[in-house]
């Protein structure tokens, strides 16, 4: 069984420092009838299709498979609900964890989120000084929700 255990945070960009070696991501979602999420993502020079189950706390089932970039682009165009999500991702090693910093673009411009994947929900993770607030349980920060309710529309 493939599990994703992930915590999500807002950050203070003034404390973050210079970000380097980011890569662009474009992703879309194929509509489902339940909490299952089917994501198509082009990440740098690679592409993936990912199937995720509903969240239970910070944990959910996740299955990810590499696919040809051409197939991913066609799926984004033909199968995915519009709009497509665009962001740039940076990886930062802090203590023993790799943090993913996502800077969103277009309809979600201005939103910056940090995520860290864990081996268990009770794993101790030392938060960097640039962490401001945990938003793991706030569904509006899920990438799939940002398409229907983009950051630019939040009050």
Image: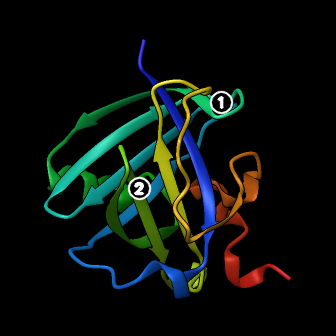
Few, some or many residues within 10 Å of mark 1 (<14, 14–19, 20+): few
Q: Nearer the viewer, residue 93 or 71?
A: 93
Q: Which residue is mark 1?
A: 54
Residue at left offset 40%, top offset 83%: 17
Disc with the residue nearer the chain's start (1 vs 2): 1
Q: Left or right of 50: which side holds 132?
A: right
Q: Considering the numbered disc 1 on the image, is that residue within a helix, a strand or a loop?
A: loop
- Horizontal side of 60 relative to 44 (left or right) equals right
Residue 5 at x, y percent in the picture: 53, 32
Residue underneath mark 2: 99
Q: Which mark is residue 106?
A: none
- Which residue is found at the position 51% from the left and 54% from the top? 115
Q: Tell me the quadrant of the picture where the N terminus can be found.
A: top left
How far across and how far down the image is residue 43, in percent? 26, 59
Image quadrant occupied by the C terminus? bottom right
Residue that appears at 41% across and 55% down:
99
Q: Point out residue 139 in the picture as x, y percentages from the top left corner.
A: 74, 51
């Amino acid at each position: 069984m493939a599990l994703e255990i992930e915590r999500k945070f807002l950050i203070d960009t003034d404390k973050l420092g210079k970000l380097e070696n980011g890569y662009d991501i474009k992703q879309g979602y194929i509509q489902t009838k339940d909490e299952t999420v089917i994501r198509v993502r082009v990440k740098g020079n690679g592409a993936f299709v990912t199937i995720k189950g509903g969240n239970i706390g910070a944990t959910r089932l996740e299955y990810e498979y590499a696919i040809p970039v051409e197939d991913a682009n066609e799926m984004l165009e033909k199968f995915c609900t519009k709009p497509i999500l665009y962001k740039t991702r940076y990886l930062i090693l802090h203590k023993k964890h790799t943090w993913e910093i996502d800077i969103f673009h277009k309809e979600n411009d201005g939103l910056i989120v940090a995520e860290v994947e864990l081996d268990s929900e009770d794993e101790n993770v030392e938060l960097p000084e640039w962490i401001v607030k945990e938003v793991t349980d706030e569904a509006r920060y899920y990438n799939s929700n940002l398409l229907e309710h983009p950051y630019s529309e939040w009050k």
